[in-house]
Image (cartoon, grey):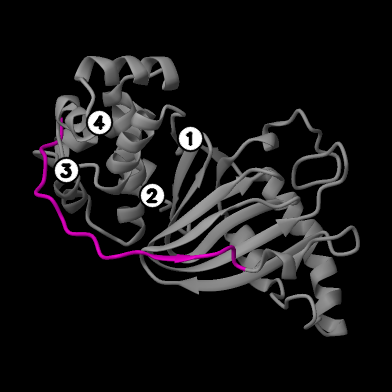
Amino acid sequence: MPRPSSARIKPASTSVGPLTPHLFTPTAERPLRAKQHTLATDTRVAPHSHAWAQLAWSATGVMRLTAERGTYLVPPSRAVWVPPGIEHAITVVETAELRTLYLHQRPGRCGPQRSDTVGSDWRHCRVLEVSELLRALMLALPTNPDGASPSADELAREKLIAPLLADELKRAAPVPLGVALPQDKRLRALCEAVLDDPTRHETLADWSRDVGASERTVARLFRQDLGTSFVQWRQQVLLARALSLAARGTPMGQIATELGYASPSAFSAMVRRSVGAPPSRFFASA
């Protein structure tokens, strides 16, 4: 069990609206559009949705994407697929160069390719590994908004890149790094507090007091709303945080200390129990 750390004072966050998605609307003629924004640490993009699918990825830095029933902490080695119509918000954990892909979806289809059906796994948010090829293709796409059309050469290049990128996205391996979020308001407040500072408290009793509920009530809500225990849920939060630290090149011993573990071996044991692999393998591609 990790040890609690002293409370940290968080800097004030900056809230911004949706980052002009209407200027990058994908169409049947241009089914894949890309845009780029660099956002500072603690910037929060307001909840929004759109009629097309999205792949959220940061070329540098770390972001957290939150949808109705889950939150996803994403370093450059991962991306998050967001289906059409799903409301989502973004928090920048570490200054990030965001590369957003918008994908046109035909009626009755959901996924990176035209043959993907509504009933597929692409109907849900999912974390995907970013291969070297997928990364290169995303960086190669033009990011001109509507009204500033790309040149004929750029448009021809986009038409060549788009189908290859869609195929590589289809092949991307899913990664079980999402952290489930509840619908109960009290439990949601507790979970969001843990996400902001997972080592502030050690016990469920301490976290429960923060939201004015008993430990027994909160434990029951975790079982009813999320189908898991607080300890198991918090381990997913710690894994996601560890992945973002590993992406910065933080040594494993330092990661264990920052997450409140008494020793690197205790942290390694948690990782093995959770994902069935040692930290050296699980974080290798971060």
Q: Which residue is drawn at 41% across and 15% down?
A: 224
Tell me: 83 left or right of 147.
Answer: left
Is label 4 in a helix, a strand or a loop? helix
Is label 3 in a helix, a strand or a loop? loop
Q: Residue at x 91, y 63 (%)?
A: 29
Tell me: 275 left or right of 36.
Answer: left
- Which numbered tag is attached to residue 118? none
Q: Residue at x 75, y 51 (%)?
A: 52
For marks 2 and 1, give the one nearer the viewer: 1
Residue hosting label 2: 284
The spot of residue 191 in percent (x, y) is: 33, 36
N-term mark: 4 or 2:
4
The spot of residue 14 in percent (x, y) is: 39, 67
What segment is highlighted magenta in the picture?
A: 1-19
The spot of residue 189 in percent (x, y) is: 34, 37
N-term mark: 3 or 1:
1
Front residue of 130/103: it is: 103
Residue hosting label 1: 176
Residue hosting label 4: 270
N-term mark: 1 or 4:
1
Q: Which residue is drawn at 66% across and 53% down?
A: 54
Q: Distance between the residues labelled 1 and 4?
A: 15 Å
